[in-house]
Image: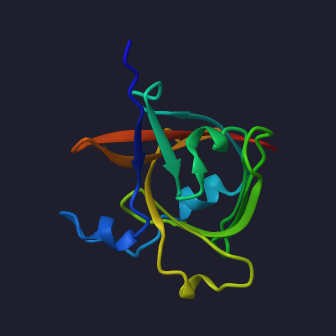
Protein backbone atom coordinates (compact mmCIF):
# COMPACT_ATOMS: atom_id res chain seq x y z
CA UNK A 1 0.00 0.00 0.00
CA UNK A 2 1.35 3.41 -0.98
CA UNK A 3 0.20 6.55 0.82
CA UNK A 4 0.67 10.01 -0.64
CA UNK A 5 0.37 13.25 1.29
CA UNK A 6 0.10 16.47 -0.68
CA UNK A 7 0.53 19.93 0.87
CA UNK A 8 -1.23 22.97 -0.53
CA UNK A 9 -0.79 26.60 0.38
CA UNK A 10 -2.58 29.80 -0.48
CA UNK A 11 -0.63 32.78 -1.68
CA UNK A 12 -0.54 35.42 1.04
CA UNK A 13 -0.52 38.36 -1.32
CA UNK A 14 -3.84 40.04 -1.96
CA UNK A 15 -2.26 41.67 -5.01
CA UNK A 16 -2.00 38.22 -6.61
CA UNK A 17 -5.76 37.74 -6.40
CA UNK A 18 -6.49 41.25 -7.61
CA UNK A 19 -4.57 40.73 -10.85
CA UNK A 20 -7.07 38.14 -12.01
CA UNK A 21 -9.70 38.93 -14.66
CA UNK A 22 -11.40 41.59 -12.55
CA UNK A 23 -9.96 44.41 -10.50
CA UNK A 24 -10.49 44.29 -6.75
CA UNK A 25 -13.20 46.76 -5.75
CA UNK A 26 -12.57 49.06 -2.79
CA UNK A 27 -16.29 49.83 -2.35
CA UNK A 28 -17.58 48.19 0.83
CA UNK A 29 -20.70 46.10 1.33
CA UNK A 30 -21.67 47.67 4.65
CA UNK A 31 -24.89 45.69 5.11
CA UNK A 32 -23.03 42.39 4.89
CA UNK A 33 -20.34 43.71 7.23
CA UNK A 34 -23.01 44.64 9.80
CA UNK A 35 -24.58 41.18 9.42
CA UNK A 36 -21.24 39.54 10.27
CA UNK A 37 -20.35 41.75 13.24
CA UNK A 38 -20.04 39.98 16.55
CA UNK A 39 -18.49 36.81 17.93
CA UNK A 40 -18.16 33.67 15.83
CA UNK A 41 -16.70 30.17 16.13
CA UNK A 42 -15.18 28.44 13.12
CA UNK A 43 -16.89 25.03 13.32
CA UNK A 44 -15.61 23.19 10.24
CA UNK A 45 -13.04 23.32 7.45
CA UNK A 46 -13.80 21.27 4.36
CA UNK A 47 -12.19 20.73 0.98
CA UNK A 48 -11.96 17.96 -1.63
CA UNK A 49 -9.28 15.40 -0.78
CA UNK A 50 -9.00 16.44 2.87
CA UNK A 51 -7.93 12.87 3.72
CA UNK A 52 -4.85 13.28 1.52
CA UNK A 53 -4.16 17.01 1.32
CA UNK A 54 -2.90 19.12 4.21
CA UNK A 55 -3.78 22.82 3.88
CA UNK A 56 -1.79 25.50 5.71
CA UNK A 57 -4.47 28.15 6.35
CA UNK A 58 -3.46 31.82 6.31
CA UNK A 59 0.21 30.78 6.52
CA UNK A 60 -0.37 30.07 10.22
CA UNK A 61 -1.30 26.47 10.87
CA UNK A 62 -2.91 23.33 9.51
CA UNK A 63 -6.51 24.07 8.50
CA UNK A 64 -7.80 21.56 11.10
CA UNK A 65 -6.23 23.75 13.83
CA UNK A 66 -8.76 26.44 12.94
CA UNK A 67 -11.73 24.27 13.98
CA UNK A 68 -12.99 25.75 17.26
CA UNK A 69 -11.15 29.05 16.73
CA UNK A 70 -12.92 32.19 17.89
CA UNK A 71 -13.34 35.29 15.75
CA UNK A 72 -14.62 38.75 16.64
CA UNK A 73 -15.66 41.13 13.87
CA UNK A 74 -16.29 44.83 14.63
CA UNK A 75 -18.08 46.36 11.65
CA UNK A 76 -17.83 50.08 12.45
CA UNK A 77 -14.00 50.11 12.33
CA UNK A 78 -13.28 46.86 10.42
CA UNK A 79 -11.13 45.47 13.21
CA UNK A 80 -11.36 42.36 15.33
CA UNK A 81 -9.49 39.41 16.73
CA UNK A 82 -8.99 35.75 15.99
CA UNK A 83 -7.73 33.03 18.30
CA UNK A 84 -6.70 29.44 17.59
CA UNK A 85 -7.68 27.41 20.64
CA UNK A 86 -7.42 23.75 19.60
CA UNK A 87 -5.70 21.72 22.32
CA UNK A 88 -3.79 19.67 19.72
CA UNK A 89 -2.30 22.76 18.02
CA UNK A 90 -0.13 25.71 19.00
CA UNK A 91 -2.36 28.47 20.37
CA UNK A 92 -2.32 31.76 18.51
CA UNK A 93 -4.15 35.06 19.02
CA UNK A 94 -3.96 38.10 16.77
CA UNK A 95 -5.71 41.33 15.96
CA UNK A 96 -7.20 41.42 12.46
CA UNK A 97 -8.42 44.03 10.01
CA UNK A 98 -11.20 42.94 7.67
CA UNK A 99 -13.77 44.21 5.21
CA UNK A 100 -16.24 42.90 2.66
CA UNK A 101 -16.30 44.60 -0.71
CA UNK A 102 -19.24 44.92 -3.10
CA UNK A 103 -17.92 41.91 -5.08
CA UNK A 104 -18.62 39.65 -2.08
CA UNK A 105 -14.95 39.30 -1.20
CA UNK A 106 -13.83 39.16 2.41
CA UNK A 107 -10.51 40.98 2.72
CA UNK A 108 -8.47 39.84 5.75
CA UNK A 109 -5.20 41.06 7.23
CA UNK A 110 -3.72 39.27 10.23
CA UNK A 111 -1.67 41.75 12.24
CA UNK A 112 1.29 41.40 14.54
CA UNK A 113 0.82 43.13 17.90
CA UNK A 114 1.54 46.85 17.63
CA UNK A 115 1.70 46.88 13.81
CA UNK A 116 -0.74 49.10 11.94
CA UNK A 117 -2.72 47.54 9.08
CA UNK A 118 -1.29 49.97 6.52
CA UNK A 119 2.18 48.52 7.25
CA UNK A 120 0.97 44.97 6.51
CA UNK A 121 1.28 44.24 2.80
CA UNK A 122 0.03 40.65 2.82
CA UNK A 123 -3.62 39.74 3.11
CA UNK A 124 -6.18 37.19 2.03
CA UNK A 125 -9.22 37.32 -0.23
CA UNK A 126 -12.05 34.90 0.48
CA UNK A 127 -15.57 34.66 -0.95
CA UNK A 128 -18.48 35.18 1.48
CA UNK A 129 -21.24 32.58 1.06
CA UNK A 130 -24.36 31.26 2.78
CA UNK A 131 -24.80 34.22 5.11
CA UNK A 132 -27.66 33.83 7.58
CA UNK A 133 -28.29 35.39 10.98
CA UNK A 134 -26.35 32.57 12.69
CA UNK A 135 -23.88 31.21 10.14
CA UNK A 136 -21.77 31.97 7.10
CA UNK A 137 -18.91 30.53 5.09
CA UNK A 138 -15.65 31.95 3.83
CA UNK A 139 -14.34 30.17 0.75
CA UNK A 140 -10.68 30.23 -0.21
CA UNK A 141 -9.08 28.87 -3.39
CA UNK A 142 -5.95 26.74 -3.33
CA UNK A 143 -3.89 25.28 -6.14
CA UNK A 144 -3.45 21.51 -5.96
CA UNK A 145 -1.53 19.95 -8.82
CA UNK A 146 -2.48 22.76 -11.19
CA UNK A 147 -6.19 22.58 -10.28
CA UNK A 148 -8.10 25.14 -8.22
CA UNK A 149 -9.93 23.68 -5.22
CA UNK A 150 -12.22 25.39 -2.69
CA UNK A 151 -11.49 25.40 1.03
CA UNK A 152 -14.67 26.24 2.96
CA UNK A 153 -14.49 27.70 6.47
CA UNK A 154 -17.86 27.34 8.26
CA UNK A 155 -18.70 29.89 10.98
CA UNK A 156 -21.45 29.78 13.63
CA UNK A 157 -22.50 32.77 15.71
CA UNK A 158 -21.26 32.49 19.29
CA UNK A 159 -23.61 34.98 20.94
Q: Residue placed at 51% from the left, 49% from the top?
A: 56
131, above or below 113, in the image? above
**Camera-nearest residue between 5 and 59:** 5
**Camera-nearest residue between 16 and 33:** 16
**Camera-nearest residue between 64 and 18:** 64
Where is residue 133 drawn, in percent x and y?
A: 65, 41
Q: Residue placed at 55% from the left, 87% from the top?
A: 118
> In the rendered image, is residue 65 in sight?
yes
Q: Residue placed at 62% from the left, 53% from the top?
A: 35
> In the rendered image, is residue 132 in sight?
no
In which quadrant of the rendered image does the N terminus lie? top left
Residue 47 sits in which quadrant?
top left
Residue lying furthest top: 1
Q: How is the image coloured?
A: rainbow
Where is residue 113 drawn, in percent x and y?
A: 74, 78
Q: Residue placed at 65% from the left, 44% from the top?
A: 66
Where is residue 95 drawn, in percent x and y?
A: 71, 69
Where is residue 107 drawn, in percent x and y?
A: 48, 65
Residue 3 sits in which quadrant?
top left
In which quadrant of the rendered image does the C terminus lie? top right
Residue lying furthest front: 1
Q: How many marks?
A: 0
39, above or below 117, in the image? above
Horizontally, is 44 left or right of 53 in the view? right
Amino acid sequence: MVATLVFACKSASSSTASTEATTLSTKLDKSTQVAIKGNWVLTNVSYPGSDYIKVNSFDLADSKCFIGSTWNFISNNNKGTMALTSASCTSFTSPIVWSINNQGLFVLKILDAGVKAKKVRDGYLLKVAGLTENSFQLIDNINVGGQTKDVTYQFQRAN
